[in-house]
Image: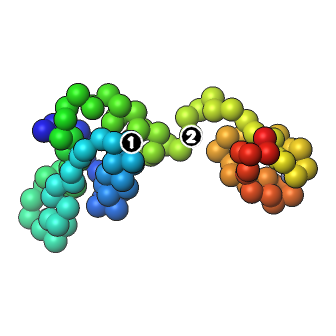
Amino acid sequence: MLRLMHAPNPIIGQHWVNVLAAAGISCELHNRYLNGAMGEIPPDQCAPELWLVDERDEALARRLIDAASNGPPTGAANWRCHSCGETLEAQFTQCWQCGATRDPRHE
Ligand SMILES: [Zn+2]
């Protein structure tokens, strides 16, 4: 087991677990029920901790969590609206020009 990192809150911690599980990485969230003890122990000690079952997954796990917390990596490809042809940046999922939702099948 390897302690990977602290999550800022249990919701994000659980989100990370889901992201890693979707990639086939076994992990566990610890300390998630200790929020009620805030103030009695240092906050760093009661934040949820993400533990990897197999430490060999560390590099991949960190990359996945990075991507999950920062959205698409900078430099991701632009896409073209299938409806009006406008070119949009990767972080947008909807065309600002005509409101069409991104549809990879039509790019
Ligand atoms: Zn459009």
Residue pictured at 67% horizontal, 40% vertical: 90
Q: Of all residues shown, which one is farthest toward the right? A: 84
Q: Would residue 84 be visible to someone looking at this image?
A: yes
Q: Position of residue 48 (x, y in %)?
A: 22, 55
Tell me the quarter of the picture where residue 52 sits. top left
Which color scheme did the rendering employ for the protein? rainbow
Residue closer to the observer: 24 or 44:
24
Along the horizontal axis of the image, is 90 left or right of 16?
right
Along the horizontal axis of the image, is 86 left or right of 65?
right
Q: Secondary structure at mark 1?
A: loop
- Report which residue position mark 1 lands on: 23
Q: Position of residue 33 (x, y in %)?
A: 17, 66
Q: Secondary structure at mark 2?
A: loop
Classify the position of the N terminus by image quarter. top left
Neighbor class of circle 1 (other Cα within 10 Å; few <14, some 14-19, many 20+) is: few
Dots 1 and 2: beta carbons under 8 Å?
no
The kind of residue tagged 2 is Pro
- Report which residue position mark 2 lands on: 72
* Label 1 beta carbon within 8 A of ligand 1: no
Neighbor class of circle 2 (other Cα within 10 Å; few <14, some 14-19, many 20+) is: some
Q: Position of residue 91 (x, y in %)?
A: 64, 44
Q: How many marks?
A: 2
Vertical relation: 46 (above or below) 36: above
Residue pictured at 79% horizontal, 53% vertical: 95
Residue pictured at 32% horizontal, 28% vertical: 59
The mark that comes first in sequence, 1 or 2, is 1
Along the horizontal axis of the image, is 41 left or right of 61?
left
The kind of residue tagged 1 is Ala
Q: Of all residues shown, which one is farthest toward the left? A: 40
Residue pictured at 86% horizontal, 44% vertical: 86
